[in-house]
Image (spheres, rainbow, N blue to C red):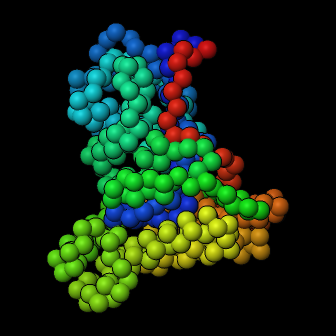
Amino acid sequence: MYEEYAFKVTAAGRVNIIGEHVDYCGGKVFPAALGFKNTVYIRPNGTDKINIKWTTLDGEVTLDINRLDEYKSLDYGNYQAGSLLMWKKAGYPIVGCDMIQDCTVPFGSGLSSSAAIEVSTIAAMCAVTGTPIDRVKIALEAQRAEREYVGVNCGIMDQYASACGKAGYAMLLDCATLDCEYVPVETGDCSLVIIDCKKPHSLVESKYNERRAETETALEILGKKTGIKCLAELDAATLEENASLLSPTVCKRTKHVVDECARVNQAMTAMRSGDMKKLGELLNASHESLKTLYEVTGKELDALAAAAQSHPACLGSRMTGGGFGGCTVSLVKTAELDSFREYVLDKYKRETGYDAAYYRTEIGDGITVEKNVK
C-alpha cells in the first residue's frame, strides 16, 4: 500500500551515552541516533485536512490545518499536531495530506519515540511541500512542540539527535550553542547494549518538569552571585563556595549537573583514546549520581543497572533518557554478550518481577527522505 505515497521520511530514536539531565542546563551531551525509527509515508491530498493512520494502531485521526492548536487532548495525533503547528507558526507551509506512521522506537523506553515522531512529521511536511530540509531548524521546532504543546519542558538533545544523527557516530553536542562534533563510536572489543526495564513511564506525569524547575532555581540564585548564564558554566569549586545559598535538595541537583558535565568531556576523551575501562567507570558514576543526587532512576532502573554492573563482562552501566523508567546503556565485552544477556534478564526478573527487553540496534542516521516509494 505504500507505493501510493509520494515520500518515505524517517527520523531516529536515540541513546544518550552520557550527559543526562544537562541539556536543559546548557551542558554538553553525548547521544547517538539509533536504527529504531519513526517512518512517515506521506502524499498530498489537495484538502485542508491531514489524515493520519498508524501501522501499530487501529483507527485514523483527521487534523484540520487551520485548527492545529485544538488537538492537545488527543491520545494519538497530538505530537503530530503540535509539531506541525510550531512549523506553521515558524512561517513554513502546511498542506493537507495523508500520512501513515510506522514507529519502531519502543514506546516508554526512554529512547525518544516522541522526538522521532515530531522530527519525522515535520520533515515529511517539508518533503511534500518542497521545503528544504534544515535539520537544526526542524529539531528546534520539534522541541518547541514538546515543550509548548505536549507539556514536557525538555532540552534540545532528543530532537537534535533524532534529526542530525549520523550512522556510526555519536554527537558531542553543546546544548548552549548547538555546536556539534561527530565522534566515531569505536569501542574496541566491547559493545554498547540497551536493555529496557519495561516499567511504563511518562515524562509528562513524572517529576521531569520538577527537576527542570529545581535547576532553574539554582541558576537564578547562583547567576546573581557568579554571573553564570547557564548552570553548565558552573565548576565544582564555585559550587562548593556558594552551596550555602541553595537548599539541600537544589544543591544536590546542581552537583549532579556540574559532575555530569565533567564526565561528558572525560567520556569523549576515553572514546577517542580507546580507554573502555575509563568509559565504563564514567557510566557507573553517572548512574550513581542520577540515583542519589538527581533522584530520577527508581527501583527498576537501579536493579537493572546493578544487575548489569555485577556481570564480569560489563565495564559499566547506567540509565539513559529522562528516567523514571526506560532503558540502561551498558558497555560489555562483545564475546560475552550472550552470557550477559541471560544473566541480566534473569537477575532483573527475579528481583523486580518484570521481563526486561534486550534491544539489538545499530547507530544510524537521523532524518532520511526517499521519493516515490515503491
Q: Residue at x 51, y 40 (%)?
A: 366
Q: Residue at x 69, y 49 (%)?
A: 360
Q: Position of residue 228 (x, y in %)?
A: 24, 72
Q: Residue at x 58, y 50 (%)?
A: 169
Can the viewer see residue 107 in this picture?
A: no
Image height of 164 relative to 304, above or below: above
Q: Position of residue 284 (x, y in %)?
A: 59, 74
Q: Position of residue 298 (x, y in %)?
A: 51, 69
Q: Is residue 156 left or right of residue 219?
A: right
Name the quarter where the C terminus is drawn. Answer: top right
Image height of 221 relative to 332, above or below: below
Q: Is residue 291 left or right of residue 318?
A: left
Q: How many marks?
A: 0
Asked where in the image residue 123 lies, by quadrant, the reply is: top left
Q: Residue at x 47, y 43 (%)?
A: 164
Asked where in the image residue 76 lies, by quadrant, the reply is: top left
Name the quarter where the N terminus is drawn. Answer: top right
